Image (cartoon, rainbow, N blue to C red):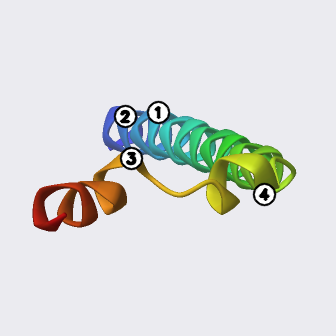
Amino acid sequence: MGSIVQTWVQVCTLLQGTALLAVLGALIVAVLRLHYLLHRTEQPSLSTTPAPEVEHPARWSA
C-alpha cells in the first residue's frame, strides 16, 4: 500500500509543478500583452493618420 501512496504523492507533485508552470506562463503572456497595448497607445500618429485606402474612392469618382 505504501507504493500506491508514494506514487500518488509523486503525481500530485508533478501536477502542482505543471499547474505552477501554466500559471507563470499565463502571467508572462498577460504582462506581454499589457506591455504591447501600452506601447501601442503611446503612438497616436499611427491611429490618427488616415489610411491610403480612404482616398481611393475620391480619386476614382473625380
Whether the residues at callouts 3 and 1 have beta carbons within 8 Å, the answer is no
The answer to which of marks 2 and 4 sits earlier in the sequence is 2
Q: Which residue is drawn at 38% across and 46% down?
A: 52
Q: Position of residue 28 (x, y in %)?
A: 69, 39
**19 lies above or below 55:** above
In the rendered structure, the answer to whether residue 53 lies left or right of residue 29 reads left
Residue identified by numbered label 2: 7
In the rendered structure, the answer to whether residue 52 lies left or right of residue 21 reads left
Q: Where is residue 30 in the image (x, y as percent from the top left)?
A: 66, 53
Q: Where is residue 20 in the image (x, y as percent from the top left)?
A: 63, 43
Marks 3 and 1 sit apart, C-alpha to C-alpha, by 60 Å
Camera-near label (4 vs 3) is 3
* 1 vs 40, nearest the viewer: 40
Marks 2 and 1 sit apart, C-alpha to C-alpha, by 5 Å
Whether the residues at callouts 4 and 3 have beta carbons within 8 Å, the answer is no
Marks 2 and 4 sit apart, C-alpha to C-alpha, by 51 Å
The answer to which of marks 4 and 3 sits earlier in the sequence is 4
Q: Which residue is drawn at 13% across and 67% down?
A: 61
Q: Which residue is drawn at 58% across and 36% down?
A: 21
Residue identified by numbered label 3: 52
* 48 vs 20, nearest the viewer: 48
Residue identified by numbered label 1: 10
Residue identified by numbered label 4: 41
Q: In which quarter of the image is the N terminus?
A: top left
Amino acid at pointer 4: Thr
Marks 2 and 3 sit apart, C-alpha to C-alpha, by 64 Å
Camera-near label (1 vs 4) is 4
